[in-house]
Amino acid sequence: MSYANSRIPTSAQQGVHEQLAARVRTHLAHPFKKPIADYNRAACAAALAGWDGRAPLILDAGCGVGHSTIELARACPEHWVIGVDQSEDRLQRRKPYPAALLPTNMVFVRADLVDFWRLLADAGLRLARHYILYPNPWPKIGHLGRRWPAHPVFPYIPQLGGVLECRSNWPVYVAEFAAALELVLGRTVAWGEFLAPQALTPFERKYRDSGQTLYRLVVDLDG
Ligand SMILES: C[S@@+](CC[C@H](N)C(=O)[O-])C[C@H]1O[C@@H](n2cnc3c(N)ncnc32)[C@H](O)[C@@H]1O
């Protein structure tokens, strides 16, 4: 697929999955007990090793090649910014700056968010800001359980607090994220279209330059 010729996810599913609410209720009633892998414990320790314990935390969950992590760290020098991705290959790809020019208030770690989110929550940590930017959409109807809102780990995400932002080029994904959050929080979560004059991530840039509409939800979990 060439650049700026990206396609919007196609799916037979046109709205919030009819089984989403039942899945979320089940996950709320039965906390996720899957054992946490040692490499994710080590990654969490590495993510916090350079933190002074006081700086507000920003998590870039599924950061890909990490451009957004770098931008957030530059924009928020008082924060400690953690970029997490499961792909070592993506994390290792060439960054837009030489290593010597990278901000010092950030760290990249390879980890599975399924464990990483639970480790942060179990440690009682609270985020100031939490970004989930262009998560894999898994648009097939039968792939509901692979989308974060329907995943057993989902209830841990709002536990982390802060201002949570999710962006996607597939409106159904953001609608499901908002619907799942509403079930957890018991309040309305707004979402909608937005413009990205300055793309924060490579996926955002690619989708924007392909003329696609972008969607996001932003919710203050502490508000
Ligand atoms: C579509 S890419 C978006 C990357 C980046 N946020 C962007 O917008 O350019 C989704 C990213 O989520 C990562 N990812 C998917 N599942 C994950 C998981 N369970 N744990 C950590 N990262 C995951 C993938 O490796 C991939 O880099």
Image (cartoon, rainbow, N blue to C red):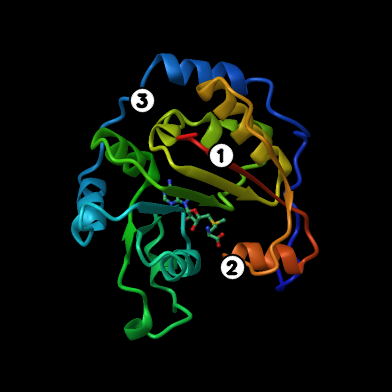
Is tag 3's residue or tag 1's residue first in the polypeptide sequence?
A: 3
Cα distance, mark 2 to mark 1? 23 Å
| Label 1 within 8 A of ligand 1 by Cβ | no
Q: Position of residue 158 (x, y in %)?
A: 45, 33
Q: Please, is residue 18 above or below residue 221 in the view?
A: above
Mark 1 residue element: strand
Q: Decide if ligand 1 comes within 8 Å of the CB at mark 3.
A: no
As drawn, the label of residue 202 is 2
Q: In whole angstroms, how far apart are the C-alphas of marks 3 and 1?
A: 24 Å
Residues tagged 2 and 3 counted as in contact (Cβ below 8 A): no
Q: Quadrant of residue 79?
A: bottom left
Separation (CA) of disc 2 from disc 3: 32 Å
Q: Look at label 3 and name its amino acid.
A: Phe
Label 1: few (<14), some (14–19) or many (≥20) C-alpha neighbours in 10 Å:
many
Q: Is residue 214 left or right of residue 49?
A: right
At 71% from the left and 38% from the top, the residue drawn is 172
Q: Is residue 169 above or below residue 22?
A: below
Identify the residue shown where x is 72% and y is 73%: 2
In terms of secondary structure, where does tag 3 sit?
loop
- Give the crowd class for mark 2: few <14, some 14-19, many >=20 residues within 10 Å: some
Q: Which residue is tagged 3?
A: 32
Q: Position of residue 211 (x, y in %)?
A: 80, 64
* Disc 2 Cβ-to-ligand 1 distance below 8 Å: yes
> Residue 171's quadrant in the figure?
top right
Q: Position of residue 175 (x, y in %)?
A: 68, 35
Q: Is residue 207 left or right of residue 106?
A: right
Vertical position of residue 49 compared to residue 100: above or below? above
Residue at x 56%, y 38% (from the top left corner): 147
Q: Which residue is mark 1?
A: 219
Q: Is residue 197 visible in this depiction of the protein?
A: yes
Q: Quadrant of residue 3?
A: bottom right
Q: Amino acid at mark 2?
A: Pro
